[in-house]
Image (tube, rainbow, N blue to C red):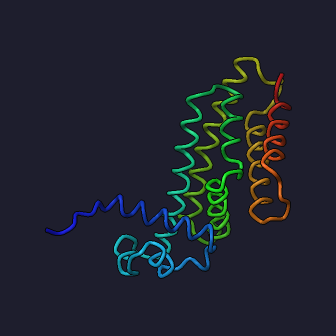
């Protein structure tokens, strides 16, 4: 009897393998052959699930962002307002190896997005989702009277996200080895600066 394979499950597993390869090898060195080798399958099997390298890379980005969204959704259920935003941003700091790998994958695609409208649109779509959730947190904090008066919520969110992104660039490039405690303290200080 032939083995029954769940097509979507296999695509997800391959997407995970590609994300892992991208984090370790970088975009240029992540080939269909390298993915097949890591996944323990043939290059032909990879091509069966993905039409070309571009589709494969996009699947890896979607996989990473969906993993992040799932993690942040669970955090959101435990907090509200400014505490929720703080917890969400804290969970995006590259402290754990899996989160560091997420940032490596994102940064791999940042330059590619300039040449690929589909990649750019996907990155913008994910960023818009994070911003929408962050703005919801800030609005709740504002209604609760937790924020300084006169703050631009959009600029406040963007500043916080720029801080998290900047920390991540620094850690990914090894330019400045920020400890987990340093990362958390920098974020905490930025959050506290918004408080009433």
Q: Residue at x 77, y 42 (%)?
A: 160
Image spot of residue 89 (x, y percent): 69, 41
In this rendered view, identify the residue nearer to me: 163 or 87: 87
In this rendered view, identify the residue nearer to me: 50 or 150: 50
Q: Is residue 94 left or right of residue 183?
A: left
Image spot of residue 126 (x, y percent): 58, 50
In this rendered view, identify the residue nearer to me: 29 or 162: 29
- Report the quarter where the C terminus lies: top right
Q: Is residue 114 left or right of residue 20?
A: right
Q: Quadrant location of residue 191?
A: top right
Q: How many marks?
A: 0
Image spot of residue 51 (x, y percent): 39, 74
Q: Is residue 42 left or right of residue 79?
A: left
In this rendered view, identify the residue nearer to me: 133 or 6: 6
Q: Residue at x 51, y 50 (%)?
A: 66
Image spot of residue 43 (x, y percent): 40, 81
Rendered position, 172 above or below 45: above
Rendered position, 99 above or below 13: above
Q: Residue at x 47, y 64 (%)?
A: 15
């Amino acid at each position: 009897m032939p083995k029954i394979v769940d097509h979507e499950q296999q695509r997800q597993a391959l997407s995970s393998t590609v994300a892992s390869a991208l984090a370790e090898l970088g975009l240029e060195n992540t080939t269909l052959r390298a993915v097949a080798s890591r996944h323990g399958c043939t290059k032909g099997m990879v091509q069966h699930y993905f039409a070309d390298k571009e589709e494969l890379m996009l699947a890896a980005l979607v996989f990473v962002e969906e993993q992040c969204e799932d993690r942040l959704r669970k955090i959101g259920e435990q907090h509200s307002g400014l505490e929720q935003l703080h917890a969400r941003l804290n969970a995006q700091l590259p402290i754990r190896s899996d989160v560091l790998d997420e940032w490596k994958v994102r940064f791999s695609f940042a330059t590619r997005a300039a040449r690929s409208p589909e990649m750019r649109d996907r990155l913008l779509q994910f960023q818009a989702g994070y911003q929408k959730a962050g703005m919801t947190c800030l609005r709740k904090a504002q209604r609760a009277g937790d924020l300084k008066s006169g703050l631009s919520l959009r600029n406040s969110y963007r500043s916080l996200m720029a801080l998290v992104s900047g920390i991540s660039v620094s850690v990914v490039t090894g330019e400045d080895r920020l400890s987990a405690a340093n990362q958390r303290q920098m974020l905490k200080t930025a959050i506290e600066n918004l408080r009433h």
